[in-house]
Amino acid sequence: MADKRVNKVVLAYSGGLDTSIILKWLQTTYNCEVVTFTADLGQGEELEPARQKALLLGIKPENIFIEDLREEFVRDYVFPMFRANAAYEGVYLLGTSIARPLIGKKLIEIAEKVGADAVSHGATGKGNDQVRFELTAYALKPDVHVIAPWREWDLRSREQLIAFAEQHQIPIAKDKRGEAPFSTDANLLHVSSEGKVLEDPAQEVPDYVFSRTVSPEEAPDTPTVISIDFAKGDAVAIDDVQLSPAKLLARLNELGRDNGIGRLDLVENRFVGMKSRGMYETPGGTILAVAHRAIESITLDRGAAHLKDQLMPQYAELIYNGFWFSPEREMLQALIDKSQEFVAGQVRLKLYKGGVHVIGRSSPYSLYDQDLVTFEEGAVAYDHRDAAGFIKLNALRLRTLGQRKRKLGL
């Protein structure tokens, strides 16, 4: 049931058919003023058509917001997440998840600026994005009214959506009149594809689904060798060329695409309770994840590294579930960022037919001591005989347990 008290609503607007239908539905159902917000997160689409579509649907020019968020996205969201080596359920690099808090934050900022009392999004009632958008909105503006049309309206089929669009003179691309073969979400970090032809996890993903990567089989037969420089846990240069965060990730995407890197066929556990199958392409992020672990391997102490690995699944789950603006995520971030103080240096990588291979790493803060690990007699004070007492102390409880088992005849 629509709340008629809404006067002005800020809509996360892509310019596509679904959010255009939502725009008109908000106007007709709530009889309210609609403000549109379109974010450039590096999805690779022109955003000017979204402005023209909004104008066509009666949105005032001053109520149309289009922002280039690529640098902020990578600097303030992607990079902090990669400092944690975050991967949901061990493999998913959270490309969709990490974009939602930024979009949600901007929705609230615009709502405050224009005096709107509500925000709206186009996420369905089955997925994770509704949770991510709304947790962000409530964290930043506790009294905000959130409108989620897919949970409210009675447009239950593609035919009903098309009929609504035709009734309200909403332009429909010819390819949108039929059911799309799968749905996608893209930004500078990744592109995800799910639904329809991808719903059966037993079936291989069709070649036409892939848009960010060549197939590993068709990648060059000659490896590509690159170097990535890090400072305080963040990548700052490729092949000794300093780049801004967004430009650096874009360059890694090109290198990953050409070498068939970053494809992931995943059945994951959604926060709302169901399993879903998706295909993710994260070419640059996959390279960055491998490189970051490599530079950490020589600059992080064992205790710090292992603690990070223990905390990572919880950190990744918080992002996946939409809790970016929670106190626990911010607490973990402070710990993670502290660990990155000396995570600096250069990693050399070989990119080849879908693989990312570390071939060298160096750092002015390296903890790797060749004199300690060499099989030759080193110059440092390490007495092999010290290991005997170390082992006996660590074995004490195991020996005690073993004696008890022997007494009990187990």
Image (tube, grey):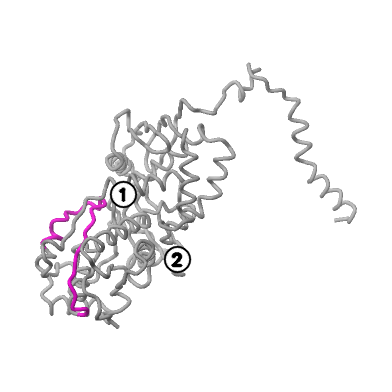
For marks 2 and 1, give the one nearer the viewer. 1
Amino acid found under the numbered disc labelled 1: Phe
Out of 257 and 8, give the one closest to the viewer.
Answer: 8
Residue matched to label 1: 73
Q: Is residue 231 above or below residue 316?
A: above
Q: Does 33 lie within the magenta span?
A: yes
Secondary structure type for disc 1: helix
Q: What stretch of residues is rendered in magenta? A: 29-52
Q: Is residue 137 above or below residue 341?
A: below
Out of 111 and 309, give the one closest to the viewer.
Answer: 111
Residue matched to label 2: 271
Q: Circles 2 and 1: CB distance less than 8 Å?
A: no
Q: CA distance from mark 2 to mark 1?
A: 23 Å
How packed mark 1 is, by other alpha carbons closer than 10 Å (few <14, some 14-19, many 20 or more), is: many
Q: Which mark is residue 386?
A: none
Out of 11 and 183, give the one closest to the viewer.
Answer: 11
Question: Looking at the picture, how far across and down is residue 245, in whole percent?
Answer: 31, 41
Q: Quadrant of the N terminus?
A: bottom left
Picture quarter containing residue 271? bottom left
How packed mark 2 is, by other alpha carbons closer than 10 Å (few <14, some 14-19, many 20 or more), is: some
Q: Quadrant of the C terminus?
A: bottom right
Instruction: Evaluate whether residue 217 shows in this view.
Output: no
Residue located at (35% from left, 59% from top): 205
Secondary structure type for disc 2: loop
Amino acid found under the numbered disc labelled 2: Phe
Question: Looking at the picture, how far across and down is residue 100, in whole percent?
Answer: 34, 58
Residue located at (75% from left, 35% from top): 391
